[in-house]
Image: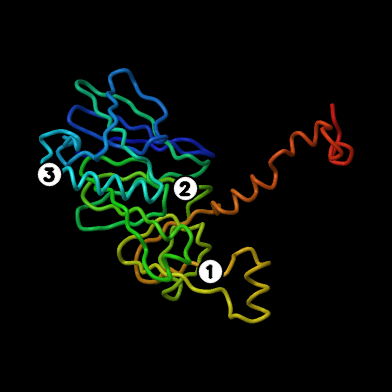
Amino acid sequence: MTLNLQLVGTTTKMALVTLTPGQVIYSEAGKFLFSSGDVVMETKLSQPSAAGSTPDSAGSGAGLGGLLRGAMDVGKRMLAGESFAFNHFHTPGGTGLIALAGVLPGEMRAIELDGSTTWFAEKDAFVAAEAGVNFDISFMGGRAGFSGGEGFVLEKFTGRGTLLIAGAGDFIDLNPADLGGKVRVDTGCVVAWDQNIRYGVERVGRFNKAGAMNAMFGGEGFSLATLEGDGKVILQSVSIDALAKALEKNAGMGDKKTGAGMGGLFSGSAD
């Protein structure tokens, strides 16, 4: 049964999901907004199975193999900085409503997995998915991983069902095959791509005067992400790194405008 959901909102999209008996969705901690009273929320270390039942990784029924797999999954998520556990949602009878959203103002996208496709996403893009969608952590190895910033730790999704991802600002959809086969992107603007795309990292310019000027003062650092192939790519219009720098730069500006310290003498009127 297809997941019944609506994406609503303007500056920040949220997903309104209507659950029916037998349907289970799971999300990362911090993505839940509200639900109707007939929705049951449980916190578990593992994701639900395709049938909706979740083996308790701490229970005796999991077996040694299940315990080891559960411990490895939790360990990978902790190493990647993801949430320690998942929130599971279902309704025991009738229909229930639940709302979920990303952590930053921006877009949200519902991606349908058919069992034969794989999607990769930058860390923190995952909002929620229905039972049957497998969540995993993929570590980008080699130079691409260590130079790519957000690309070092990737979220990997397989299986069958609806996947919800979110990003900052507006989403931009493109296919590198329509743009000569390759696009170069600020590493902080990459959201997700399918298995037909090759992700890499390349240096900005050469190690000369022009290259150093471009890297240090051009705002992009020494590396850009590269996306090649004939597939689907989702980018976001707001770089997470740029957003963090802007917030840090303007931290405390409110105090200055109210006349606190010498800054208040020159930074505008004070009531």
User: On the image, numbered disc 2 is attached to which residue?
Assistant: 167
In terms of depth relative to the viewer, which is nearer, 117 or 240?
A: 240
In terms of depth relative to the viewer, which is nearer, 44 or 247?
A: 44
Of the two numbered discs 3 and 1 on the same chain, state the one appearing first in sequence.
Answer: 3
For the residues labelled 3 and 1, the Cα–Cα distance comes to 43 Å
Residue 16 picture location, percent across and down: 37, 32
For the residues labelled 1 and 2, the Cα–Cα distance comes to 21 Å
> Of the residues tagged 3 and 1, which is closer to the observer?
3
**Image-quadrant location for residue 44:** top left
Q: Is residue 128 left or right of residue 13?
A: left
Residue 219 picture location, percent across and down: 64, 63
Of the two numbered discs 1 and 2 on the same chain, state the one appearing first in sequence.
Answer: 2
SS of the residue at dot 2?
A: loop
Residue at 13% over, 47% down = 65
Give amino acid for label 3. Answer: Leu
SS of the residue at dot 3?
A: helix
For the rendered model, the colour scheme is rainbow
User: On the image, numbered disc 3 is attached to which residue?
Assistant: 64
User: On the image, numbered disc 1 is attached to which residue?
Assistant: 223
Q: How many residues crowd mark 1 within 10 Å: few (<14), some (14–19), many (20+)?
A: many
Residue at 40% over, 60% down = 233
Residue 188 picture location, percent across and down: 51, 57
